[in-house]
Amino acid sequence: MNSASAPGKIILLGEHAVVYGQPALAVPVKQVRATVEVWPSEYRGVWIDAPDIRLKAELHILSRDHPLASSLHTLFFSLGIDPFPNLNIRISSTIPIASGLGSGAAVSVALIRALSAYLGQPMPDEEVNKLAFEMEKLYHGTPSGIDNTVITYARPVYFMRGKPIETLKPRERFTIIIGDTGLPAPTKESVADLRKLWEKDRHLWEGIFTEVGRIVNEARHAIEYGKIKELGELMDRNHELLQQLTVSSSELDRLVEAARKAGALGAKLSGGGRGGNMIALIDAASSNSGVTAIEESLKRAGARRVITTRVE
């Protein structure tokens, strides 16, 4: 049997403005993972067992446009495997689906690593990342490339559309606490609404996007030079701008305020907004009681799920 796993991801700063040519930062979430196991099958065909999405079927039974089927066909083609071998593939994940934590990209990366190793053609990270990006297109149409890169390299990433993605090495470790509102994050809707506002007054909104971009660049400097308190202040400012961009919500604002009052260095929404997740920053050296205080504060404020992860 061959197995591989991959972490989730979360946007740290720069969401929405990234669509308008500004940079964004994202980090891995190692406490949640997608895992893929591959082993020989006594039956003919490629058998897929993915209990998280209630799927148990042979590959050729699935429609070619099914995301997993498309991913597997893409992977076999890239490896030059024809005919397909008889094998079992089990996919499991602790990453919540459609939560902004990169569940699809994590499955793709784990699938590529497990299957390529099983077939005797293990891939280096660069090739894994390229192929995962092609698979992301099957899920999302026009992905940014940020999800698969963060997840492949399990490192913080600086991204700007149209430019090579850069991985970062934090000078000091820091901890992120993710609070889930339990509400869906209608990313397409919030992006479309913001586009309408932008079209009515491009000067106004591009001024805000430019300010977000400045914050992201300062945050990159803070991460690379270990200025964690400064990073928290930048997160707070980014959230204020996201509120101006109309993509926050009362639920997100309540969780952000609860985290700050409980001692977070900074807090903001993450991702599409109007639902989904927020994040809070604390120093990696904080005591367990300090972490617990913020976790409990988020739960009391309505968080349905809390995930704590260290970035290093």
Image (tube, rainbow, N blue to C red):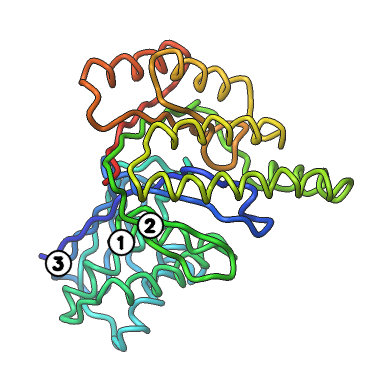
| Dot 2 and dot 1 residues touching (CB under 8 Å) | yes
Residue 136, position in %: x, y?
Answer: 47, 64
Q: Extreme left residue here? A: 1
To which residue does mark 3 refer?
A: 39
Q: Residue at x 62, y 20 (%)?
A: 250
Q: Circle 1 sits in a helix, a strand or a loop, which is it?
A: helix
Circle 1 crowding by C-alpha within 10 Å: few under 14, some 14–19, many from 20 = some
Please state which amino acid type lies under the numbered disc 2.
Val
2 or 3: mark nearer the eye: 2
Please state which amino acid type lies under the numbered disc 1.
Tyr
Foreground residue, 84 or 204?
204
* Drawn side of residue 96 relative to residue 211, left or right: left
Mark number for residue 150?
Answer: 2
Q: Is residue 18 above or below residue 69?
A: above
State the separation of the CA atoms marked 2 and 3.
Answer: 27 Å
Residue 85, position in %: x, y?
Answer: 22, 79
Residue 75, position in %: x, y?
Answer: 35, 76
Quadrant of image for the N terminus: bottom left
Residue 220, position in %: x, y?
Answer: 45, 50
Mark number for residue 153?
Answer: 1
| Dot 1 and dot 3 residues touching (CB under 8 Å) | no
